[in-house]
Image (cartoon, grey):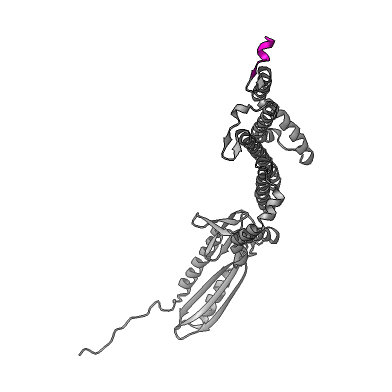
Amino acid sequence: MNDFFEQVILDNTVRQYCIVFGVILFTLALKRLISKYFAGLLFLMVNKIWKDIDKKSFTGLVVKPLGFFLLVLVSIIALHKLTFPGVLNADIYRFTVKEFIHTLGSLILIISFCALLTRIIDFIALILEKKADLTPDQTDNQLIIFFKDFFKVVVVIISIVLMLKYAFGLHVGSLITGLSLVGAALALALRESLENLIASFIIFFDKPFVIGDAVKIQHFTGSVEKIGLRSTRIRTEQKTTLTVPNKQMVDSILDNHSQRTQRRGDLKLDLSIHTSSASITAVVNGIKEILTQKDIETFHVHFSEITTNASIIIADYYTAPLTAAAFNEIKESVNLQVLKLLEEREVEIAGANADIRVSGNLK
């Protein structure tokens, strides 16, 4: 039996193959249990910083990528104990099969570790979002979304650097120095993306708007759904999605409807030029009485001017920052009451009884 295990196949004994593949199969069989154990250790570390977090949610989010990372790590370490068969070490272009497999293993290990880190970032963002939902201010929510995407980008960039160094054996410092001119060209080419990134920081720290605000940008009106690293997503009144570059959100004149303190309604009446002064006075006083309702905070009514065709009364009134539907109800009520007032006072609108006469000479 010992002779069987000592047999050499492809530069390695049978015993070595059994030990290596036994370790890999053992890890594969107990991958979920092992990953749950390490996820529990990570949870203890996270729980020291953030209390009252859900362990089940954390392990459910982290177990799968953690298990895959552990399986890849153990497999690479175990296979490294074997001697690569010289018969199989053929040349592929300028690389050997051994170098190719080593590079592939390093890539898989780095990618799996990157996936694990992004899952942890997602979970931390989920915890912070739940805490931010307890406050009425939406600024915290948009900062969490922004920095979640930002740190994911940082993790991806670091992973690429690790791939270049450990998988492809490149000297990163020399590579960055050598690519300085290329980097300058890329910076010029990506100028708009960099400007949008800088604009996103301006939005988060200057806070001209937050997620959920109703804004008007150029000719479009809608509510802000997401503020990203490059652009802001707005849900328009037509229920379509409008994506606006952050630089444009910063540079353009933006009207934030959610930050107004009042809503304004306007009323203009062009009365017939034949309306008496007593009737005009009665209409002005009647409009003032109509506007003294509880939903209207302040108002102004005055007899504005007399033209050749009409006597003009102008009124404006202000309500609390209500929703559009509630404000439209108040506006409709005011208009109907004013119309009823004109009917009761028998006051005509200018041009209501105008006759159209056509005259000419027939030749």
| Residue 355 picture location, percent across and down | 34, 80
Query: Residue 314's image quarter?
Result: bottom right
Residue at x-position 63% and y-position 54%: 229
Residue at the farthest left position: 363
Residue at the farthest right position: 48
Using the image as rendered, state which of residue 73 and residue 241 is in the foreground: 73
Query: Residue 193's image quarter?
Result: bottom right
Residue at x-position 59% and y-position 69%: 317
Q: Is residue 258 left or right of residue 307?
A: right
Residue at x-position 58% and y-position 32%: 90
| Residue 78 picture location, percent across and down | 69, 27
Vertical order, 24 against 350 (above or below)? above
| Residue 262 picture location, percent across and down | 63, 65
Residue at x-position 48% and y-position 69%: 339
- Which residues make up the magenta segment? 1-8
Q: Is residue 228 left or right of residue 44?
A: left
Q: How many numbered discs sit on the rendered protein?
A: 0
The C terminus - image quarter: bottom left
